[in-house]
Amino acid sequence: MLDKATIEEMRAYILGEKDRLESELGSFAKENPQAEGGFESKWENLGNSEEDNAVEVAEYINTIGVERELEARLGEMRQALERVDNGTYGVCANCGQDIPPARLKIKPEAIYCIPCSEKLQR
């Protein structure tokens, strides 16, 4: 089991990462609880010409990809915070063994120990 200091250190890191992701998403998307990942990319209207419309579509397509990646990471951070709050952070969801602090420092959202993660990826 993780000691209290390590849990608090990880909590602080996860909260910082969550805030950073929300800020980054907010720079190009608006929060929308009904949208799949909780955010919705803004459509930028550049003009009415065919060229403007083509640029708008291309930019929107690129933005959607970035939005989805950031939303997925944000979801992982939120789930990690839930595990911290309910006392299951650092415990493998598959085998119940402790996840080593070194792994959590590299991948704070980890829900599996390395052996279980490798098994589940096969």
Image (spheres, rainbow, N blue to C red):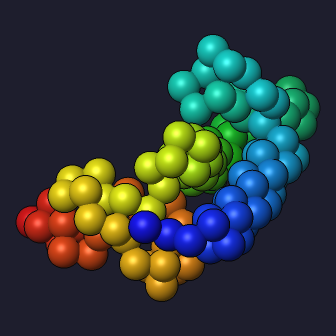
Query: In the figure, is residue 88 to the left or right of 21?
Result: left
- How many numbered circles does the render carry? 0
Residue 5 percent coordinates (x, y): 68, 72
With respect to residue 105, does 11 lie above or below? Answer: above
Q: Residue sitting at 63 percent across and 67 percent down?
A: 4
Tell me, yes or no, if residue 52 can be seen here.
no
Q: Quadrant of residue 11?
A: bottom right
Q: Which residue is drawn at 78% across and 37% down?
A: 29
- Quadrant of the rendered image containing residue 32: top right
State the residue in front, 59 or 53: 59
Left or right of residue 69: residue 120: left
In the rendered image, the quadrant that contains the N terminus is bottom left
* Quadrant location of the C terminus in the rendered image: bottom left
Residue 20, can we see it?
yes
Where is residue 12? Give x, y as percent. Answer: 76, 63
Answer with the quarter of the image where residue 117 lies: bottom left
In the image, residue 34 sits, relative to residue 56, either above or below, namely: above
Q: Where is residue 91 in the image (x, y as percent from the top left)?
A: 37, 59
The picture places residue 66, in percent across and down from the top left corner, at 62, 52
The correct choice, above or below, for 5 with respect to 35 in the image is below
Question: Image height check: is 104 above or below 11?
Answer: below
Answer with left or right where residue 13 lies relative to residue 44.
left
Residue shown at 29%/51% (left/top)?
93
- Identify the residue at horizontal 48%, vertical 79% (top origin): 101
